[in-house]
Amino acid sequence: MATDLLDDSDREIVSLLLVNARATVADIARQVPLSATAIKRRIARLEELGVITGYTVQIDFAKLGWGIEAFAEIRFTGTTHPDDMREVASSEPEVLAVFTTAGDHDALVWIRTRDVAHLTSVIAALRSHSQVIGTRTQMILASYVKSDWQPHFPHD
């Protein structure tokens, strides 16, 4: 497992990048007792190991005209393979993520649209697939995503 290959400096680098993915190597070197060159090598190694899988930006989509978010719970026929669930549920461009789940519904789909009419059309398109036997949609009124969450890395 990749975590077996990480030391405290690697964990600190990951923690700092979680707080600010735009932090420079020099910024990180000021907080981790390693040279900038060593930090750069470690970041490259963390990317190669698949610990760091990408970098992102946070956007206010409502300001771009995409202000409606919803979660749709989808039930599929009993013979639908999980890969097919993902394919069907992600077939609409407005779908941001698909989570296969255990329980009453088979998948939870995160959707972003311009308005309620647009959301209605996306749900209708998802329902039109022959493997889909039911949906339940919940519009998001407000959201809070913890931006300061940090994993608690086990120490050796």
Image (cartoon, rainbow, N blue to C red):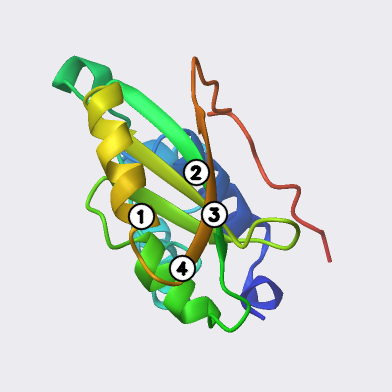
Q: Badge 3 local density, few (<14 within 10 Å), some, or many (20+)?
A: some
Badge 4 element: helix
**Disc 2 vs disc 4: which is toward the camera?**
2
Amino acid type for the residue under numbered disc 1: Leu
Find residue 115 and report its horizontal and vertical position in percent: 25, 22
* Distance from the alpha carbon under mark 2 to that under mark 4: 35 Å
First in sequence: mark 2 or mark 4?
A: 4
**Disc 1 vs disc 4: which is toward the camera?**
1
Q: Badge 4 local density, few (<14 within 10 Å), some, or many (20+)?
A: many
Q: Are marks 2 and 3 in contact (CB under 8 Å)?
A: no
Find residue 156 and report its horizontal and vertical position in percent: 84, 66
Please tell me the numbered disc located at residue 46: 4
**Disc 2 vs disc 3: which is toward the camera?**
3
Q: In this view, does 113 lie to the left or right of 1?
A: left
Q: In this view, does 47 lie to the left or right of 18?
A: left
The residue at which mark 2 appears reads as 72
The one of 113 and 135 positioned closer to us in this rendering: 135
The residue at which mark 3 appears reads as 134
